[in-house]
Image (tube, rainbow, N blue to C red):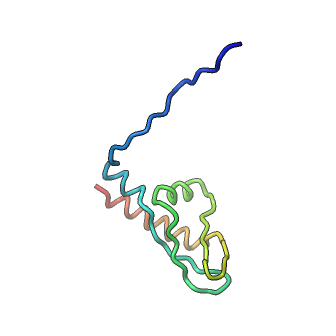
Amino acid sequence: MEEAQLGTIATLTFAPPKRADRARSRSITFVSTCPACGLQRSQNGYTRRAIARLLETSHTIDAYCVPCDVLWPISADERLAMATLIAAHQDQAP
């Protein structure tokens, strides 16, 4: 019986991320209106990189209202505003 061999070995690094990577990996905050109570709720569970990936792949970006215990996908207008802000920030990056 042959043993399976791994093609690559994962290695961990504890080196600090580069400046550009650090900016993309920080959590960002945005607001979305809860469909249950109608109030704008701060959302901070996504990194800029995750938001950009979800926008590029047309995946759902969810928001959550703690008092109402409601989860919802952000609206098309909210997605457009977020994409515009991320694109503007990328244009300003060194």
- Say which residue appears at 55% left-offset and 68% top-offset: 79
In the image shown, does 83 or 18 lie closer to the viewer? 18
In the image shown, does 93 or 27 lie closer to the viewer? 27
- Say which residue appears at 67% left-offset and 76% top-offset: 70
- Say which residue appears at 32% left-offset and 48% top-offset: 18
Q: Quadrant of the C terminus?
A: bottom left
Name the spot of residue 5 as percent of width and height, x first: 59, 20
Q: Quadrant of the N terminus?
A: top right
Looking at the image, is 40 positioned above or below residue 56? below
Looking at the image, is 25 positioned above or below residue 44? above
Name the spot of residue 37 as percent of width and height, x first: 64, 86
Residue 28 left/right relative to 58:
left
Residue farthest toward the top in the current orientation of the protein = 1
Residue farthest toward the left in the current orientation of the protein = 94
Total marks in image: 0
Looking at the image, is 54 positioned above or below residue 38? above
- Say which residue appears at 66% left-offset and 77% top-offset: 69
Residue 13 left/right relative to 43:
left
Residue 57 left/right relative to 30:
right
Residue 14 left/right relative to 57:
left
Name the spot of residue 57 as percent of width and height, x first: 59, 53
Name the spot of residue 11 as percent of width and height, x first: 45, 34
Looking at the image, is 29 positioned above or below residue 68? above
